[in-house]
Amino acid sequence: MAQAQLPVSGEFPVASGHHPTAWKWYDYFTFNVDHKLIGIQYLVFSFVFYLIGGLMAVVMRTELYTPDADVIDPNLYNALLTNHGTIMIFGWIVPAAIGGFGNFLVPLMIGARDMAFPRLNALAFWMLPPAGLLLVGSFLFGGAQAGWTSYPPLSLITANTAQSMWCLSIILAGTSSILGSVNFIVTMVKMRVPSMSWDKMPLFCWAMMATSILALLSTPVLAIGLILLLFDINFGTSFFKPDAGGNVIIYQHLFWFYSHPAVYLMILPIFGIMSEVIPVHARKPIFGYKAIVGSSMVICFVGLFVWVHHMFTSGTPPWMRMFFTVSTLIVAVPTGVKIFSWTATLWGGKIRYTSAMLFAIGLLIMFVVGGLSGVTLGTAPVDIHMHDTYYVVAHFHYVLFGGSVFGLYAAIYHWFPKMTGRMLHEPLGKVHFLLTLIGANLTFLPMHVLGTQGMPRRVAMYDPQFTQINQICTIGAFILAFSVIPFLVNVIWSWGWGEKASGNPWRALTLEWTTDSPPIIENWHRLPVVTHGPYDYGLNHHQEMPTTPAHS
Amino acid sequence: MKQLPASIWTLTVGILVTLIAVWVGNNSHFFPEQASVQAPLVDNFFNLMLMIATALFLLVAGTIIFFAIQFRQRPGDEGDGVPLEGDFSLEAYWTLIPAVIVIVLGIYSVEVFTEMGGFAAGGGGGNHLLMSHHHHHEMKAQLVSDEMSEPTPEFEAKYGLGGAGKPDVIVTVTGMQYAWIFNYPEGITAGELHIPVNKSVQLNIKAADVIHSFWVPQFRLKQDAIPGQDTELRFTATKVGDYPIVCAELCGGYHGAMRTRVYVHTQEEYDQWLAENLVAQNPDLSKTVAVHTEH
């Protein structure tokens, strides 16, 4: 066995003789190498940025309550829309899903004591605060205003300083993501507890594997695009300056070669979360383990060949428009496999309506809407009408809010007890779910109509015929903003004073639940031994964990 | 509770879902009016997908909600559910059915795209592209009579929606922050687009500063205006009226205000508009005659 000679017992880089058994609060603000602490750093950091990005959305929706640009300056509006998108992607969903839950869960789920490269792991996290500061600081210089896509030439001639800061910020975040991905892949390949064969590895880990491969292959290309952009802005090159022989379409290819896979980076870990949360709270084995693993890998692969569907109305030759229509449609098949598998997992279950499960089921339905509208958008003929309209805004918010954010909430409700040793308040969680569900649909459902009827996206002023629908969206956005309050109250109160959680409050079968809540430093009193599958609910042999940790 | 046979349930649900989906597909009023030849093509394709999507949504969401209610934890039951780990035929079924749907939609996409003029891009306006060499030669032949040995048109579109043969009207569209400028070969410059109804129109699209996107929702047509790379749209307007022209690509602070209108005239009205503007904009009429007309 390859694992035999590996240091599974953990060569912890901290001088192992005298490190504490639990971290103090101030450790969370330091360069610490514990994967659990880093995971929580990622989560708290990204949630702060979620609030900042959300506030930007609220200001934008307030502006859009009336057709005229009468609340804020239109250039500031563009800075807000640019940074709202950027922050929600690079500051919230990616770091929360991959950095936060990936870091906290992967070593625990495979029975490792930490990630393969703990210092690299901490380094990856600590690249994010400067990246975030660059984005926030860019507002002193007007903020980047060319959209999160930052297409040249607009990005070359608008707010140069802020745009440069934006580029640096994304390059930092991208580098962080590359470092993280290497770490995840090596950790999963090399550090699984010897008794865990590949087909016993939890689906969240498989999703992280697909995510990491995808991030490794695509992120460097984005970095290339942004470095060239940075040079064009600051050092007089002309890669993307058409009047000096440059080509603006090349940038779009470089950008989308990363940024479409980025959508999968934001949803694959969430798919993984779904595959963990649903079986536990439905008390059922996951339906079609292998199909779910396979579909993650197929999405990872096909996802690399769909990027041009963002460019159907751009400088894109006919064959490309058709090739990428077909490749985009193909993604619907593995995605469907997942949706159907989770639905089938519900069948015959004994579903516990915890807040985590409510968000998971909410996600399932919201994601179906987003997936189906995605199919319509993926075809070039329809996209020629719909591209860059509010229909697109509606579509990706169903996927990224109804999908990713719902999934992150489900994950927080599910793993909060493991992370903090305290339960979240369930009734408050249900209020939060209800408000989020209503708010999200009120905000994003009417946007489909806006786009179809002729309202372009990224506008601070619009034709007065769209006023009513926009006002519905704005009210929805206010509800969404309000929905965060019960959640925040819940998290802060429960973290300090919530009901104490046992090691395994949901009676779940994956390895992270075999240790304390919160797990001790280096995770295990004694390394667990895998004797059954991660989802063997209803199969009798799981009644007692063989390696229940003896306290001290 | 007396149970109806499963087959009756399946049949009823199937019929209901089909009826609702067909109704939704045929009664969606999301789109603005159809004012170009391409518009009904796009709408019909979208409505077909909407029909399929409605059916799928009802089935999947319905199943989820039904399962969620049916298989809820009953009070006092702390046990686990049925230990079912998969079912090959079911999984094959829900992989193959979507695959078939997707393949059909893919083929249909190509058909609609072809009909819209997607594969004729670069073919009509004196331009060239791999797939339309014959058009190129055609145009070359026409231009041979000109003094110029090279057809080097000042305009060379490779991307967009094109068409074979010579269009009835050619207009050069220039996007700039934050206006659309329309230049007619006759020597007219306008801030709105004027075109005759039921005539093939060729828009040669350019950008002066940043990327813009020319969009007429009622035509269902959109094409980016790209600095350094000319694009085109070939279409035929089918309804007299005036419709919004919207910039769809973020182009700066007043992107949302970059709107103008397209006026679709009857041929007589259009001719009159042309004549009036020719006089108004070209006091020295002899000049306009000298403009190359290619007729």
Image (cartoon, rainbow, N blue to C red):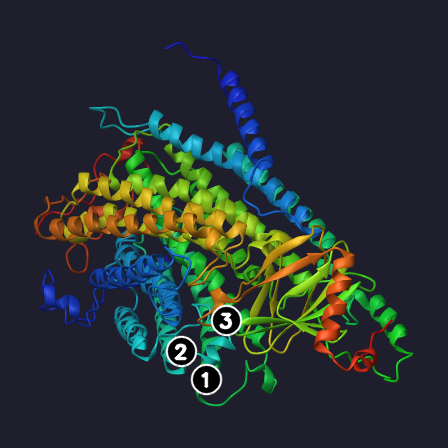
Q: Secondary structure at mark 3?
A: loop
Q: Which residue is mark 3?
A: B251
Residue A250, image quadrant: bottom right
Q: Where is mark 2, residue-wise?
A: A163
Q: Chain of mark 2?
A: A
Disc 2/disc 3 C-alpha distance (Å): 15 Å
Where on the picture, by quarter, is residue A107? bottom left
Residue A376 to residue A172: above or below: above
The amino acid type, in three-letter code, at marker 2 is Gln
Nearer to the camera, A200 or A58: A58
Question: Residue type at mark 3?
Answer: Cys
Q: Position of residue B242 (x, y in %)?
A: 63, 56
Q: Is the same chain shared between marks 1 and 3? A: no
Mark 3, other Cα within 10 Å: few <14 / some 14–19 / many ≥20: many
Name the disc covering residue A513, or none.
Answer: none
- The disc numbered 1 marks a residue on which chain? A
Q: Earlier in the sequence, mark 2 or mark 1?
A: 2
Residue B22's x, y, as percent? Answer: 59, 32
Q: x and y percent of residue A462 in the render?
A: 46, 59
Amino acid type assigned to the residue bearing label 1 in the image: Ile
Relative side of A21 to B7, left or right: left
The residue at which mark 1 appears reads as: A233
Q: Is residue B149 above or below residue A257?
A: below
Residue, far bottom: A236
- Look at 33% across and 64% down and name the residue there: A71
Residue A201 shows in this picture? no
Report the side of B138 relative to B174 (left or right).
right
A298 and B237: which one is in front? B237
Name the front one of labels 1 and 3. 3
Q: Residue at the location (20% across, 62% down)?
A: A37
Q: Dots 1 and 3: beta carbons under 8 Å?
A: no
Q: Are marks 2 and 1 in contact (CB under 8 Å)?
A: yes
